[in-house]
């Protein structure tokens, strides 16, 4: 099998055998990298799908992410978290797009506390003092998908990475290139915004 | 009807809700939350609801990746001849 991996700078000064072995080793590393990255594509797509609002956008984002990942595979350190590395590329691409297309920072004050959604749902449940599993039944998967899509990007990113993608705060901080404290504060606020949106879609807001 | 002191505790408990579920409380704060939750059905319901909600968000409906996209990703690989 011949590998189409030209590497002129390696072959210039080294004896043929050494250069060939290096090229072959690099090709093996590259193939392994590509296979490992592709094995994660379902998980990468899952996160992408929740970061953007349409299927088409998610597909474009994943495709651009893999194109960039395959081009810059040498900057990945083997043995580190490849899923986080891929998602860092993906979120950067998404942020670049967001800057071009829509940037909607949430600057309005958020007065509601963490019991707000429950209180709203309970108030509007026929049996006013229902158990919490009756109240939670009022929420549908569709309402959560819609509410999440309404959360501004910066906050949605951390919810998707931590609460859906199971990344640690530290991983999310690294992926988004922000301090861990910012991840925590955006998560806290983002969850509240999500609940406000859920109240609006499920009960009809104020 | 809750007394003003009890209302303060409920308010405190509401502030501790997210860090409690994230296991991000100091021991002292944990004790405050758990003692209050033992006594307060109002807060207990809201804590359980939040746990349900977290699970719900975590299990948000999945859409399978289109096999055509997977094929496009494979096609991005460096060709081997």
Image (cartoon, coloured by chain):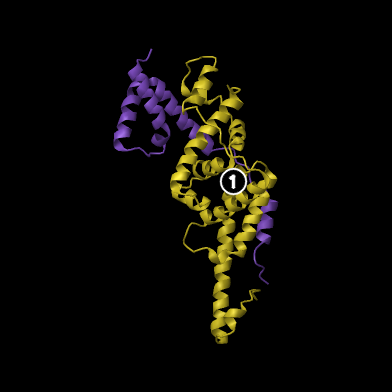
- Residue drawn 60% across and 49% down? A95
Q: Chain of mark 1?
A: A
- Label 1 neighbour load within 10 Å: few <14, some 14-19, many 20+: many
Residue A150, by quadrant, is top right
Q: Does the rendering let one see residue B56?
A: yes
Question: Where in the figure is residue A129, as x and y percent of width and height?
Answer: 47, 16
* Image position of B48 (left or right of B33): right
x, y percent for residue A8: 62, 79
**Of residues A100 and A75, which is closer to you in this image?**
A100
Does A191 sit above or below residue A158?
A: above
Q: Which quadrant is the N terminus of chain A positioned in?
A: bottom right
Front residue of A1/B50: it is B50
Residue furthest out toward the top: B1
Quadrant of image for the C terminus of chain A: top right
The answer to whether residue B55 shows anywhere in this view is no
Q: Position of residue A51 (x, y in %)?
A: 60, 44
B56 to the left or right of B5: right
Res. B14 image quadrant:
top left
Mark 1: secondary structure: helix
According to the picture, the residue beneath numbered tag 1 turns out to be: A46
Chain B colour is: purple
Total label count?
1
At a point 29% along the width and 34% down the height, the residue shown is B28
* Residue occupying the point 68% across, 51% down: A60
Residue positioned 62% across, 55% down in the render:
A65
Instruction: In the picture, one chain is yellow; tell me its letter.
Output: A
């Amino acid at each position: 099998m011949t590998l189409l991996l030209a590497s002129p700078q390696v072959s210039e000064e080294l004896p043929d055998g050494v250069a060939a072995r290096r090229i072959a080793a690099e090709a093996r590393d590259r193939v392994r990298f590509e296979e490992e990255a592709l094995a994660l594509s379902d998980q990468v797509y899952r996160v992408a799908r929740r970061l953007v609002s349409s299927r088409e956008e998610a597909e474009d984002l994943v495709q651009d992410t893999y194109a960039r990942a395959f081009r810059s595979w040498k900057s990945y350190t083997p043995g580190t978290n490849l899923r986080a590395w891929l998602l860092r590329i993906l979120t950067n691409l998404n942020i670049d797009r967001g800057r071009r297309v829509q940037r909607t920072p949430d600057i309005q004050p958020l007065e509601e506390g963490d019991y707000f959604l429950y209180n709203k749902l309970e108030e509007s449940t026929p049996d006013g003092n229902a158990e919490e599993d009756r109240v939670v039944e009022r929420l549908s998967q569709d309402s959560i998908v819609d509410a999440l899509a309404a959360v501004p990007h910066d906050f949605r990113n951390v919810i998707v990475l931590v609460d859906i993608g199971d990344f640690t705060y530290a991983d999310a901080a690294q992926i988004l290139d922000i301090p861990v404290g910012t991840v925590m504060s955006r998560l806290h606020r983002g969850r509240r915004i999500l609940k406000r949106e859920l109240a609006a879609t499920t009960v009809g807001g104020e | 009807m809750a007394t003003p002191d009890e209302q303060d505790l409920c308010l405190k408990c509401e502030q501790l809700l997210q860090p409690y579920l994230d296991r991000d409380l100091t021991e002292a704060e944990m004790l405050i939350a758990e003692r209050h939750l033992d006594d307060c059905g109002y807060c207990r319901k809201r804590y359980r609801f939040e746990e349900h909600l977290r699970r719900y968000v975590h299990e948000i409906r999945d859409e399978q990746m289109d096999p055509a996209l997977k094929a496009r990703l494979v096609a991005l690989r460096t060709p081997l001849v």
